[in-house]
Amino acid sequence: MSQGRERRALIVCLLLVVMLVWWATGTVAGVKERPGVVRVMTGEILPPGRMWTSITGEWYSQKVPTGTEYTQSEGRGTASIACGLVTGWEASLSLPLRYYMDDRPDAQGEFGQGDLAIGLTAGRTFGAGLHVAANLFALAPVGAEAKPVDDTKTSPFSNDALQVGGGLLATYDFARSDGGIPLKTHFNARYLANFLELPTRPTTWNNLLLLGMAGEWDLGAFSPFVEISSDQPVHNYLIYASMAPIRLTPGVRFSTPVGADLTLGVDIGLSQELDQWDVSPEGFGPGYEVGDKLVPPWNAVGAVSVAFPAWYPPPPPYGVVTGQVSDTESGVPLEASISFPDTDIPSVSTDPSTGRFVVEVPEGSWKMVIAADDYLWRAGKITVARGGHLAVSVRLRSRERAVSTERAEARYATVSQLFAQAQELSQRGELYEAASLLQRAVNLAPDNVEVQRLLAQTEAAIRSQIAVHRADANSYESTGRWSQAAAAWRMVLQLDPENLEAHQRLVTIEQRRTAPPPRSRGAAGAGQGARAAAPSSGAGGQTGAGKGDQTALSSSQVRTLYTQGVRAFTEEQYQRAASCFRQVLQADPGHAGAKSYLARTEARLQRLKTKN
């Protein structure tokens, strides 16, 4: 006996952890549920104070072993009334009726004999997709008189005894949670007790625990499912041949709406007992009288269901919109207002602790606005059906984070533009301008590795070219080719306008170029006389004036103007750059860098003028 109990306990534990399964739909009043019947407990939130009625019908056929294999057919019907109590809670009253369509000579119940039950269920929805319900029921036989039963052929569902019980049903719908996958999982535990009068036993209560888990992949009209269940005898005088420690039922469900209110469902599956109870007196315990056990093959399970809902009272011309408002980043519930502009629909506020709301909205399409303090508001169009229910989940973004994000996006756009312009300038050999743009980009985005890498490459190229031009300038100076040396130093200034050595060398070269050539002593005396007489000479006066105009700016001023012009050019201040370069050329008409930059500046100004 202890081995049997240990085995049962092990099977129960395995059942609870093996898989996600679907406890097939059907009546909620103690009759074993089958796929295809629309559940009363749907997990949806009913409007407070509203009632919803449903009538379902099912035809079910399966081979059931009880010592010999036979086919038993059953017809089932259920009438249910569900009522929304408060938000998230619902209750239902159901009247399931089952008839046996079995005319075998040794049948326990005659043709037309069945069971009538009454059940009361209450449930609540938690979070996004969890629904938990509790059920109490009572069942009694009706119809034709049942045949006498004995210890070997007794079913808990087909005798003259009253049966009572209760159960728990938990459903989690992943499609309604944040994951969004179309998977529904179910767990069902029910405890049955029936009052038996057996010829060979004293009147007693006979108890049975039924467990089930299952999963349903909801693909719309096509939904595969798999169910695993167990029948656990508790203080039983009998082991019923139709009971099994563990039973597997895979199948597929087809459902489609017919018209506006009718739903048609068809289920096809296979049922297999993966294990069996030891129904011998030695295995189950001394003193028990048990029947033979027949392990069935895979049995076909088929069901057809038709269901249509009806509101009582008739549904008003509006539906219910429910939802939750939370923070985009943290998911924290928010206290927000839900309004419908340009309508007479009253605004509602969310619950500050949960962020949830419920609002009745007339049927039709409406603009809904969700707003919260210090958050960016959101708006969208919703369509509500008469008597329908629409679930909405909204996440708002903090205004402070939004502004910070917009600034970051603006900086990113500016850095991207500067980077692209610098790449173009580098390809054209305008390295100083490219380096200036890249330095601005680095200042905006110090952590941008790509910008830093290109800036380092550009600065390395500048240093390399400066070294080349510097070597050329020194070589020209050593041979007295002052014009070529000056041009080389100006190339250095194009790459580095603030290069002090280049500025000093240009001043030195200019002094050497303008210094008088060495003369003989006589010629020098004549020259001194000429210079002494020069102030009184008209021509000499004019020449002196011309020389004074050309050297009106010092070399340091020319250098400063040139540097300012280059900076203005890189900052796209072309008018200012052109002015600087023209002043440089007035003071030094041979300044190669100013000539080059002035030409490019005027070209840029012309392009801008053409665009405008």
Image: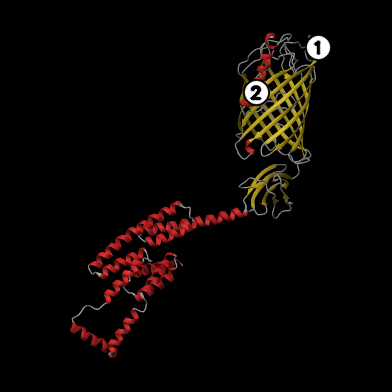
Which of 126 and 338 lies nearest the eye of the viewer?
Answer: 126
Discs 2, 1 touching: Cβ within 8 Å: no
Dot in front, 2 or 1: 2
Q: Which mark is residue 13?
A: 2
Amino acid type, residue under disc 1 in the picture:
Pro
**Spot occupied by residue 494 in the image (x, y as percentages of width and height):** 35, 65
Numbered badge on residue 202 = 1
Q: Nearer the viewer, residue 510 or 366?
A: 510
- Image vertical order of residue 413 relative to residue 104, above or below: below
Count neighbours of disc 1 (C-alpha within 10 A) and say few if under 14, some if 14 to 19, many if 20 or more: few
What is the quadrant of residue 506 in the picture?
Answer: bottom left
Image quadrant for the N terminus? Answer: top right
Say which quarter of the image contains residue 425: bottom left
| Three-letter code for the amino acid on which mark 2 is drawn | Cys
Distance between mark 2 and mark 1 Cα atoms: 33 Å
Count of marks placed on residues: 2
Which is nearer the eye, 478 or 497? 478
Q: Percent x, y for residue 348?
A: 73, 50
Disc nearer the start of the sequence (2/1): 2
Residue 389 got which mark? Answer: none
* Residue at image coords 26%, 70%: 482
